[in-house]
Image (cartoon, rainbow, N blue to C red):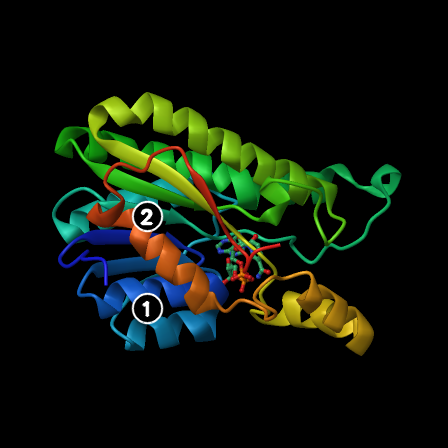
Amino acid sequence: MPDVRGRTIAVSGGATGFGRAIAGAFHATGAHVFAFDVREPELAALQASGIAARHVDLIDRAAARDWIARVEDEAGGPVDVLVNNAGGVAGQAYQAFDAVSDADWDTVLAINLGAAFALSQACMPGMVRAGRGAIVNIGSGASLRASMTGVQAYCAAKHALLGLTRQLAHELGPHGIRVNAVAPGFVVTGGATAHQWASYGEAGQQAVIERIALRRLGTPEDIAGVVLFLASDSAAFVNGEIIAVDGGR
Ligand SMILES: NC(=O)c1ccc[n+]([C@@H]2O[C@H](COP(=O)([O-])OP(=O)(O)OC[C@H]3O[C@@H](n4cnc5c(N)ncnc54)[C@H](O)[C@@H]3O)[C@@H](O)[C@H]2O)c1
């Protein structure tokens, strides 16, 4: 298992789904894990499991930046690994492009892209001082091609997140900071994805699975394992990359 013992890990959207699995995987290796989210009961469960969990709505970029300062205070040093995980479609699906409101567009851009901007920027000075750091961005198949969920802003934001990954890898690499991304395939992680999966019906679900070379859906743990690898010294010379974690297409 990649070794991240003793490192300070900051995970956005850690209460459920991938974020929960990622926070848990780092915690299991002996890292100091900090996570935030907006889901209260799940945050309490996270805290009870030994992960420092806090309520932050990352639509508020100032609050997101403050959270990083707080993590650094509590950890007594810079963030070693930032995982920009929070995101999603904010309850939207299959909207005709000419019906998309400004508010819907802005929300999806804010949670998938604006938050990664603010959190990465807030971590940068500490990482630069330390001369090392790793940022892992949770992209999507929608970073590489059209989105299954028909949310234009999501596809645009996840493509842009890949652009941010490549640009920051180029700019922060000289400081020893690596920036990479993963592009998960479809994984049922709860409410929205469970609803999406159910909407396909049995034949649709079978068709989705048949398009996956490994003939199964992924799990949050499949995603967490690759994030852990990218964050660790096992990936010390991997920078500016996006790894598809989708079972092969
Ligand atoms: N599940 C999939 O099929 C899939 C596929 C590709 C990419 N992704 C991406 O992976 C990431 C995690 O997805 P997931 O499936 O685990 O979703 P999820 O909804 O289970 O997790 C996202 C987490 O982010 C949190 N979050 C959302 N908005 C927030 C806000 N404003 N402030 C603070 N926290 C907020 C949610 O509360 C939630 O806990 C997302 O970026 C998503 O776009 C998911």
Q: Using residue 249 as the reference point, say whether residue 11 is left or right of it.
A: left
* Residue 47 percent coordinates (x, y): 31, 71
Q: Position of residue 86 (x, y in %)?
A: 49, 53
- Residue 205 drawn above or below residue 72: below
Q: Residue furthest front?
A: 213
Q: Residue at x 26, y 33 (%)?
A: 177
- Classify mark 2: residues with Cα within 10 Å, few (<14), some (14-19) or many (20+): many
Quadrant of the snapshot with the N terminus = bottom left
Closest to the observer: 163 or 44?
A: 163
Which label belongs to residue 24? Answer: 1
Vertical comparison of 167 with 42: above or below: above
Q: Position of residue 70 (x, y in %)?
A: 25, 48
Residue linked to disc 2: 230
Question: Front-most of 102 and 158?
Answer: 158
Task: Give me the residue at 82% from left, 49% from top.
Answer: 95
Choose the circle earlier in sequence order: 1 or 2.
Answer: 1
Image mark count: 2
Would you say the beta carbon of the disc 2 residue lies within 8 angstroms of ligand 1? Answer: no
